[in-house]
Each structure stands twice: as C-alpha cells, then as structure tokens.
Image (cartoon, rainbow, N blue to C red):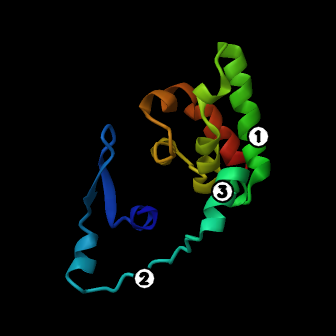
Amino acid sequence: MRQLLNLNYIAIKNWEYRSLGLTSKSQEVLSGAIKLNLRKQKFALSKEVKKEKKSSKLSEGIHGRLDLFDSLKELRNKIAKEKNLPSYIVFNDKTLHDMCALMPRNDSEFLLVHGVGQNKLENYGKAFLEVVRKY
C-alpha cells in the first residue's frame, strides 16, 4: 500500500476515516498500458520468529535507526514529563518505530504513522517531525 501511495496510484481520499481511492494515474495500470513492478517484502511466518518477536521485540531493530528511535524516545519522555502524562500516552514504542521506518517529512506523511491522528499531529507533530528531519 505504501508503495502505491508513494507512486501516486492510490491516494487517501478522507483523512478522518483514512479511506483510499484510485487516482487517474492508476488507470494506466488497470488498462494494461503500463506494467507495475513493486518491491516484494519478505515476511517470516515461522513459529520461532513469532515467539522471538513477542519475547524480544524483534521490530525494534528492523528499521536500523536505533539512534533516531532513542532521540524520539527522549523527546516523548520530555513532553510526557512536561504534561505530567505517562510517556505511552504521548506515543507508544510501536509508533516511534513506525516513525523510524517511514521517516515522515510532512504532516500528510506523519498521519500515515501508526497511532497518529489529527489530534496528535496538532499536539506533537511539529516537534517529532523536526527530530526525524535531522536524520
């Protein structure tokens, strides 16, 4: 889905409900005028990998940006302390890892991050995007 979004074959039509729709560019693919080549992603489905993921948080190292993750975590903790909130209320670890994987550059891309809605974008988007841009 992310590849299709980035290539502009589909677009988010309604941000509130995050519904998708075809763009005019997608007609080229549907009519057979061009062939669409997308990158294949490998998914490990073995029981061992599932157990490892649950026990050791395998997703932490997949994006390879642990330095960025640590910076985002520091920012999250700072904001949480200022607002007297638990840090997971600002953003949970899964959201921070998704930021590291997606590397959002603007508000629209930031809304694609797991756990980010309009409210969190308005409250925290500017600060977190600034940290991501540094990397």
- Residue 33 seen anywhere in this rendered image of the structure: yes
Q: Residue at x 67, y 21 (%)?
A: 80
In this rendered view, identify the residue nearer to me: 83 or 52. 52
Residue type at mark 3 is Lys
Circle number at residue 71: 1
Residue at disc 1, secondary structure = helix
What crowding class fits label 2: few (fewer than 14 Cα within 10 Å), some (14-19), or many (20 or more)?
Answer: few
Q: Give how far apart the Cα atoms at labels 1 and 3 are.
A: 23 Å
Q: Give how far apart the Cα atoms at labels 1 and 2 are.
A: 35 Å
Q: Give how far apart the Cα atoms at labels 3 and 2 are.
A: 30 Å
Q: Earlier in the sequence, mark 1 or mark 2?
A: 2
Q: Residue at x 54, y 25 (%)?
A: 123
Q: Are marks 1 and 2 in contact (CB under 8 Å)?
A: no
Q: Nearer the viewer, mark 1 or mark 3?
A: 3
Q: Give the image location of residue 29, x and y in percent.
A: 27, 79
Residue for badge 3: 53
- Residue 63 seen anywhere in this rendered image of the structure: no
